Image (cartoon, grey):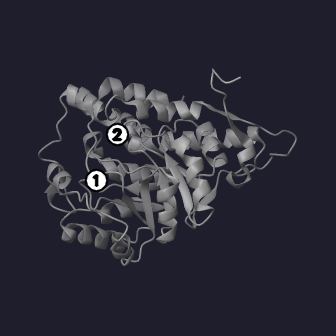
Amino acid sequence: MNLADYEAFAREHLDAPLFAHLDGGAGDERTLRANRAAWEALTLRPRVLVGVDDVTTATTVLGRTVKAPILAAPLGFQELVARGGAAATMRGAARAGVGAVAPTISRATPAELAAAAGGLHWFQLYCFRDRGITNELVAQAAAARYDALVVTVDGPVLGRRERALRAGWEAPTDLVVTATGLTVDELNRLVDPGLSWRDLEWLASFGLPLVLKGVLTREDARLAADHGVGAVIVSNHGGRQLDGVAASAEALPEVVDAVAGRLEVLVDGGVRRGIDIAAALALGARAVLVGRPVLWALAAAGEDGVAAALTLLREELATALALLGCRSPEDVTPAHVAWRPRPDTP
């Protein structure tokens, strides 16, 4: 019936430490909980008698047409969730007519994941101290003709994910990232904490548009625009890095206002319903990324599950648009949403 049903299946059927690793957040999980609570704190403001006999969810993201403003987020360890892992997710997203971001952490190569995609597809990149590894990954992505390079910028070090630690989670020692020949543990140790704005020129030299994933402030949003970035993703890494930062929905208006149309803004974190996507559009997002629900759908039914879950989300958005009085995502405006007053507000 909805994405929560996939989560219930995964909670019951996945190995408990693996589920704790994928589902958990950092520290006390304040940000993890806030991500969902922030969408629920928004009230939609529908308009009536405006004629919605021909509603479409289709839009463009960085110039590429998608059937809905939705992308499957880059997710590591998908091969531990279901056979085919990340490639199955890429195929499922293509069947649903939405975009997908291929992860660095996968047994499949960038070329294999690109071949599995059928529409908008980006490649997610961690930058490593060994620039040779990073160069090779970007070169593979460029050769596979990805639409953009998604640079994860909120992970100079790993957040402390206590729920996973308590459950006894350890990254499998035999999980090799095929594109690099290194294990996940080896790659984690090689992530470059010294990555800076100066490195963007080098990354842009490969010819792929750059998308920065992990922007939460107006200051960084303006710097991204100044450095010629094509888009930013307002994201707190699903509450898995620095606990206590703003929920993505709360940070979104600040970023949108700061860039003033100079680049596209996307958002992830806690999106579970079509009405959440409608609210994100009203707050200025071009599209949303969906993470954990894709993993749960993958666990339930592989490629078919991903396709069904993302199609369900697209259909929920179509209903939300019609009931808001909007014929398309472009018709959604800031006037269609409001924050609920806090209980202590007069």
Q: Element under label 1?
A: loop
Where residue 140 sits: x, y (%)? 29, 70
Where residue 85 sits: x, y (%)? 31, 47
Q: Nearer the viewer, residue 33 or 277?
A: 33
Identify which residue is drawn at 57% across, 36% down. 273
Identify which residue is drawn at 38% across, 75% down. 201
Badge nearest the viewer, 2 or 1? 1
Amino acid type shown at disc 1: Pro
Identify which residue is drawn at 18% across, 55% down. 187
Which quadrant of the figure contains the N terminus?
top right
Q: Is residue 219 above or below residue 79?
A: below
Q: Residue under circle 1?
A: 156
In-image side of 220 versus 22 (left or right): right
* Residue 345 sits in quarter: top right
Which quadrant of the figure contains the C terminus?
top right
Where residue 328 sits: x, y (%)? 71, 52
Identify which residue is drawn at 47% across, 27% down. 5
Crowding at mark 2 (Cα within 10 Å: few <14, some 14-19, many 20+): many
Residue 146 in view: yes
Q: How many marks?
A: 2
Crowding at mark 1 (Cα within 10 Å: few <14, some 14-19, many 20+): some
Going from N to C along the chain, the mark reached first, 2 or 1, is 1
Amino acid type shown at disc 2: Arg
Q: Nearer the viewer, residue 111 or 127?
A: 127
Q: In the displayed image of the protein, which residue is found farthest to the left?
A: 173
Q: Element under label 2?
A: loop
Q: Residue under circle 2?
A: 240
Q: In the displayed image of the protein, which residue is found farthest to the right?
A: 49
Give the CA separation, mark 2 to mark 1: 13 Å
